[in-house]
């Protein structure tokens, strides 16, 4: 399962949708990036494959980041959530 996290300005928790395949996750990632670059559509609507009743809509001008991560089982594949992992 792949998770696409959308980081929205002034929101501490990312919005997430999930896709079963890497290709589908990459397609959603590219859709978000293309919307950010073009400014159109003004509102981007996404659904989640894991929970089909889950829908999100975000104003593209408020998106500050997007990331794809792979989930295996209950835990992420050795990566903590978020964009930066600090190590000592």
Image: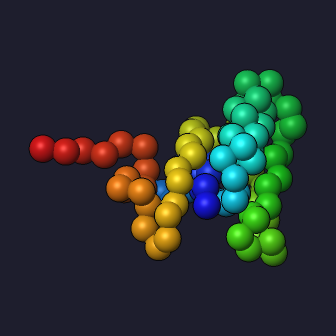
As drawn, which residue projects farthest toward the right? 41
Q: Residue at x 80, y 71 (%)?
A: 52
- Where in the figure is residue 46, as x and y percent of width and height? 79, 55
Looking at the image, residue 9 sits to the left or right of residue 45; the answer is left
| Image height of 50 relative to 29, above or below | below
Q: Quadrant of the image for the C terminus? A: top left
Q: Residue at x 52, y 50 (%)?
A: 69
Q: Nearer the viewer, residue 77 or 82?
A: 77
- Where in the figure is residue 24, as x and y percent of width and height? 75, 47
Q: Residue at x 66, y 47 (%)?
A: 22
Looking at the image, residue 79 sits to the left or right of residue 34; the answer is left
Q: Nearer the viewer, residue 25 or 33?
A: 25
As drawn, which residue projects farthest toward the left? 88
Q: Residue at x 75, y 64 (%)?
A: 48
Looking at the image, residue 83 sits to the left or right of residue 42; the answer is left
Which corner quadrant of the image does residue 29 belong to?
A: top right
> Can residue 62 be seen here?
no
Q: Nearer the viewer, residue 78 or 45?
A: 78
Q: Nearer the viewer, residue 1 or 34?
A: 1
| Image height of 41 relative to 73, above or below | above
- Where in the figure is residue 14, as x and y percent of width and height? 55, 56
């Amino acid at each position: 399962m792949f998770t696409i996290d959308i980081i929205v300005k002034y929101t501490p928790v990312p919005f997430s949708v999930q896709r079963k395949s890497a290709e589908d996750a990459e397609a959603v990632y590219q859709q978000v990036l293309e919307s950010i670059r073009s400014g159109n559509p003004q509102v981007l609507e996404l659904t989640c494959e894991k929970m089909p009743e889950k829908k999100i809509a975000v104003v593209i001008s408020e998106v500050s980041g997007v990331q794809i991560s792979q989930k295996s089982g209950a835990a992420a594949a050795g990566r903590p959530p978020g964009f930066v992992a600090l190590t000592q």
